[in-house]
Amino acid sequence: MIKDSKVRYGSVSKTFHWLMTVLIGWQLLKFGDRIAEGEHWVGQTLVPWHVSIGSLLLVLIVLRLAWVVSQRRHRPAQNPATARLVKAGHGLLFAGMLLMPITGMLVMLGGGYGVTAFGMEIFAEGEEVPWAASLGSLHSPLAWALTVLIIGHIAMALFHHFVQRDDTLKRVL
């Protein structure tokens, strides 16, 4: 089943979810590079792809948001007692996933570096742009906030699966 239903997420939603899970996990390995100041294997092998993967994630989150909007009437129903919290949590996750690559690009543009993804120049190098650098400075704090949200998301999925023993986690597997 490609589309979402009232009981399960469809294959498109699941593919977006798990593909982005892997790519965001890859991006969060940047913390290891920061901790080891570039001397870590992460800094030598995965971090050079950071801008490219971030650019890909920006495209994916825009496509995913369009898909979510198109499926909003078909998605599994939430427990009415917690529906607002669930929507708020997912809203914050989506906001974080959208803002991370945007602020990352602002870091690059603000520093005058330009943005190149997968060998293709998206924005050319140029002069420093102070306002972009200023907004780009939110990239790191947003990364920490998104990490906390992701940990909470995982914890709630596991809580539903192991404590409440409902099918919340199974919907997306």
Image (cartoon, rainbow, N blue to C red):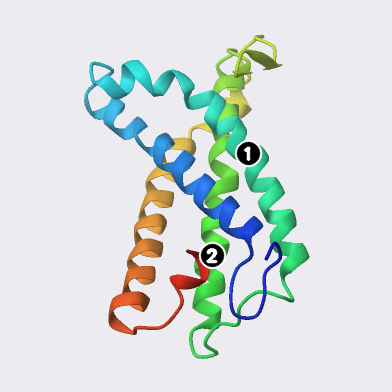
Q: Using the rendered view, name the quadrant where residue 6 is placed.
A: bottom right
Task: Say whether residue 157 is visible.
Answer: yes
Q: Amino acid at mark 1?
A: Leu
Q: Residue at x 57, y 58 (%)?
A: 14
Q: Residue at x 43, y 35 (%)?
A: 27
* Front-lying residue, 86 or 64: 64
Question: Height in image: 4 above or below 35?
Answer: below
* Front-lying residue, 85 or 41: 41
Q: Residue at x 56, y 21 (%)?
A: 108
* Cα separation between marks 2 and 1: 17 Å
Q: Quadrant of the N terminus?
A: bottom right
Question: Height in image: 159 above or below 29?
Answer: below
Task: Say whether residue 134 is visible.
Answer: no
Crowd class of label 1 (few under 14; some 14 to 19; many from 20; radius 10 Å): some
Q: Return the disc, 2 or 1, that comes first in the chain's sequence.
A: 1
Question: Height in image: 73 above or below 58?
Answer: below
Give the residue number, with chain letter if any, for mark 1.
58
Q: Residue at x 62, y 59 (%)?
A: 11
Percent position of residue 82, x then y: 49, 84
Q: Residue furthest top?
A: 126
Relative horizontal placement of residue 25, taking residue 137 as reference (left or right): left
Helix or strand or loop: what does disc 2 sit on?
helix
Helix or strand or loop: what does disc 1 sit on?
helix
Q: Which mark is residue 78?
A: none
Q: Residue furthest bottom?
A: 81
Percent position of residue 101, x then y: 57, 36
* Front-lying residue, 125 or 65: 65
Question: Height in image: 6 above or below 51?
Answer: below
Q: Using the rendered view, name the quadrant where residue 143 is placed.
A: top left
Percent position of residue 47, x then y: 40, 23
Give the residue number, with chain letter if any, for mark 2.
90
Q: Amino acid at mark 2?
A: His
